[in-house]
Image (tube, rainbow, N blue to C red):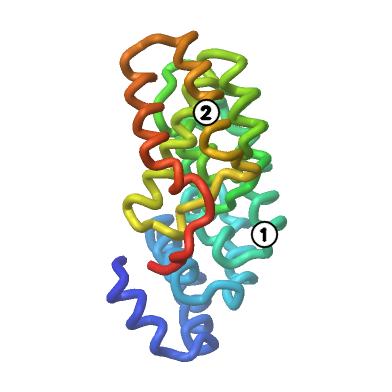
Amino acid sequence: MNESINEAWRQHPKASVLNLLITCYESAQNSHWKSTILEICSHCLGAAAADLVRRAWLDYPESMYFGALAKASAACLPDEEGFSRCFEAFKTLPLKEQRRRMMHLYDFKNPQMLDWIESHIEPPITDDWGSLASQSGITWPRVTKWLESGRPLSLVALDSLSGVVRAAENGRWKRHVPIQDLPPKEDAERCLRDYEAADTTPRIKHQIDHLMERFHLLGPQRERVS
């Protein structure tokens, strides 16, 4: 699936597309086909496909992938319903599986994932943790709390800031979730430099330098396209 294919699907009336996809879903013979149908729903139908997505949940986990359900739930179901369905299924997984699948919860942009990070963080600390935090509406008070707690959460705090900056640098506006309650630059720098003084590794200095150079990208941006 790519954008040109998605656009071709969007040229047809939603009702016609939905009826076709329902028929295809009921006759689909494997999880891959069903997941592809949900991908079309995610990109082309939105809320119009809500009942089909609810139907697909009946096939999880026997014949439906969690990732496809999460994406379709975020795009097609009401926010709270979609997140609740996914998070309840997510919580039943072993921690190792939760870590592998946490990326599928990015699209919900739900602050409850920040609480989950606090409760489940453990090495290795890859930037996936920070990427999830950057998508989940992290606030500056939470950033400072994590910095003050030290590693590993302090590393996730910095990675979350870097994730917000990176989304803006790459023009990925749908992935850019501004830091809430962001203070003036001088106050933020004072906080970050205090942490740098306590954690003197070269990586930390470089990351904080980069953040301060691009501090303006941590707040709301005018452009919201693409």
- Which quadrant does the C terminus fall into? bottom left
The relative height of residue 16 versus residue 143 in the rendered view (above or below) is below
Residue 111's place in the image compared with 142, above or below, is below
Percent of width and height locating residue 54:
64, 63
- Which residue is found at the position 63% from the left and 39% from the top? 139
SS for dot 1:
helix
Which residue lies under the disc numbered 1?
79
Residue 59 sits in quarter: bottom right
Q: Secondary structure at mark 2?
A: helix
Question: Which quadrant of the rendered structure holds the N terminus?
Answer: bottom left
Crowding at dot 1, Cα within 10 Å, few <14 / some 14-19 / many 20+, comes out as some
**Residue 205 visible within the image:** yes
Number of numbered discs visible in the structure rendering: 2
Q: Is residue 224 left or right of residue 181?
A: left
Q: Position of residue 82 (x, y in %)?
A: 65, 56
Which residue is located at x 58 percent, y 52 percent? 108
Q: Nearer the viewer, residue 62 or 209?
A: 209
**Residue type at numbered disc 1:** Asp
Front label number (2 vs 1): 2
Percent of width and height locating residue 222: 48, 64
Q: Which mark is residue 157?
A: 2
Please tell me which residue lies in front, 88 or 110. Answer: 110
Which sits earlier in the primary sequence, circle 2 or circle 1?
1
**Which label sits on residue 54?**
none
Quarter residue 172 falls in: bottom left
Looking at the image, residue 18 lies above or below residue 177: below
Mark 2 surroundings within 10 Å by alpha-carbon count, few (fewer than 14), some (14 through 19), many (20 or more): many
What residue is shown at x 41% (from left), y 83% (from top)?
10
Label 2 is placed on what type of residue? Answer: Ala
Q: Is residue 105 visible?
A: no
User: At which x and y percent is residue 47?
Assistant: 60, 73
- In space, the residues marked 2 and 1 are separated at their CA atoms by 25 Å
